[in-house]
Image (cartoon, rainbow, N blue to C red):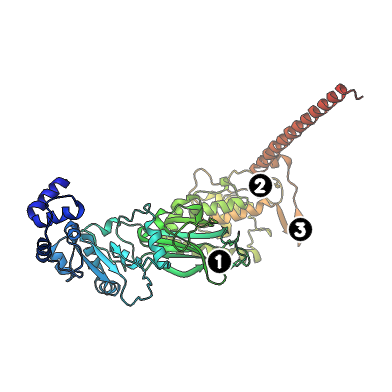
Amino acid sequence: MWQAFLLQMQETFPSLFRFYFRSYCPNFQPVLTKEEEERIFAEYHYTGATTNIHPLLSSLINYTHPVKFSGFDVAEGNNLHFHMSSFSESTGLGYLKQCAPEFVNYNKRQLSRIYPKGARVDSSNFLPQIFWNAGCQMVALNFQTPDVYMQLNMGKFEYNAGSGYLLKPDFMRRPDRTFDPFSESPVDGVIAAHCSVRVISGQFLTDRKVGTYVEVEMYGLPTDTIRKEHRTKVIAANGLNPVYAEAPFVFRKVVLPELAVLRFAVYDENGKQLGQRILPLDGLQAGYRHISLRSDTNQTMVLSPTLFVHIVIKTYVPDELSGLVDALADPRAYLSEQKKRQEALAHMGVDDSDIVEVPAKTNAAKSKILQKTNGSAANLLNEKENPPSSARSDGNLTSTGSSKLNNEATPAPVDKFKSITAGASWKRPLARGTRADGPHHNTHLSAPPDSRKISSESTISAQFSSSMRRASMRKQDDKLQVEPIEVDDLKKDKLFAKLLKKFQKESEELKKKHQKQRDSIQKQQVCVRGFARCCGFS
């Protein structure tokens, strides 16, 4: 390759070729004369901001061609990818303010360089993240000033092993995509992130006995950038192992995680920085992590200080869809209303066998059912205060009323309280604590084989009545009377049988445990006795 280059250079610039070998090969003959050197410099013309560039260096630069920026339309019309333009900090901000999407498209095609404005005589720096968001490839900073912005630059490019090259996101490279760096909505094809950071403690932050605190910041798009908001409390007089145990710092919505970085900074109580670390968000791993801190110049420190944090990174979910996502993540926590009611009734002691399945009502009939249910509660109160002539003082129907309902093929619309005991004449198991020949013929509710399905409000009332009957307690003549429960009826109860089985199982386990401990103690005693006999003890 070099031979072809030298041959081409000899044919194109013969005088320059001889000058090259004279400069780098002193023994090369023939040597250019002084007149030939003057003629070479006179023939060479360089147009640009600087004119003191060596001709040989200028001839070797063939990757980019610096040109004066004439506008985004002109650059798009020329479509020359090797043209590079430089912008001052102020000029670049002006183009971002006026036409940010055009600036992004320009950087898709060719290179741009941003340098600090001339007014920064103190060698201060500007925020490079602003121009990284627009896709600018070369953002020049004052390396002699290790401020926050310089730390941000070194921390970002440390991600790719310090190679100085980071690939821009896909939508900032494809010509068929449009991107606005000031957008607040998620970019098409990019999933927004949700990040939370909990600072737990610090280790070896400083060898001085001073108070310390931690700041957590995020840099990215303008909508993602959060500065000077998340800060821990000051732990006084502890620079060795302070424990912060703060609530998590939440970055609720990160529109573009690929451009976002997290900054951890530790300060003493006087505001002096003790250590810092810049980490790209897409390079973090969730969980409990130890973060090694760096100095102002991004160098490792003598004490190797670290921060112990807990990081949570997940997909951002809008508020209106959070319920759906939680239901998909944990279906058991979001059971239907019917399932919740069934569990509530089971908690109150109602068996599933006591519940009659009824057809689901439509949305149009829900309000009507609610009104009926509310009306039935009022009727129950009225009948309790003023019982009808066909009912006893305790609210149970007489056998006459029961037989009347039994003779009807289809139950007529009767009072809600009567509908509870509408099936009193059908064959059902007796309630616990009652007898067939007793004065109170209380029974379980069960539908006959040929009956129609009972309405939902009747079922609710029946469940309430059943739970009340399970108590086997009645109030008569202002005196509390408790009826005895037969042993045979108690053994038939499902809940009692379940508890009895559980008790027997626990009893067996306890006996086995005691027997195991007893065998172990006996074995130890045998060993002790044998050892005593061997030693001659009686």
Given contact means CB atoms under 8 Å apart, are the residues at marks 2 and 1 in contact? no
Amino acid under disc 3: Leu
Across and down, in percent, residue 366 comes to 45, 61
Q: Which mark is residue 462?
A: none
Q: Residue at x 33, y 57 (%)?
A: 190
Residue at mark 1: 213
Q: For label 1, count other residues whose C-alpha is less than 10 Å away and answer few (under 14), some (14-19) or many (20+).
A: many
At mark 2, the secondary structure is: loop
Q: Residue at x 19, y 51 (%)?
A: 25
Residue at the extreme right = 538
CA gap between label 2 and label 1 equals 69 Å
Residue at mark 2: 431
Amino acid under disc 2: Ala
Total marks shown come to: 3
Amino acid under disc 1: Tyr
Residue at mark 3: 480
Mark in the foreground, 2 or 1:
1
Given contact means CB atoms under 8 Å apart, are the residues at marks 3 and 2 in contact? no
Does residue 447 appear to the left or right of 36 in the view shown? right
CA gap between label 3 and label 2 equals 19 Å
Q: Is residue 130 visible?
A: yes
Across and down, in percent, residue 503 comes to 70, 39
Q: For label 2, count other residues whose C-alpha is less than 10 Å away and answer few (under 14), some (14-19) or many (20+).
A: some
Along the line of sight, which residue is nearer the eye, 194 or 475? 194
Along the line of sight, which residue is nearer the eye, 307 or 424? 307
Q: Residue at x 56, y 59 (%)?
A: 200
At mark 3, the secondary structure is: strand
Q: Residue 501 occupies which quadrant of the picture? A: top right
Q: For label 3, count other residues whose C-alpha is less than 10 Å away and answer few (under 14), some (14-19) or many (20+).
A: few
Along the line of sight, which residue is nearer the eye, 344 or 275? 275
Q: Which badge, 2 or 1, comes first in the chain's sequence?
A: 1
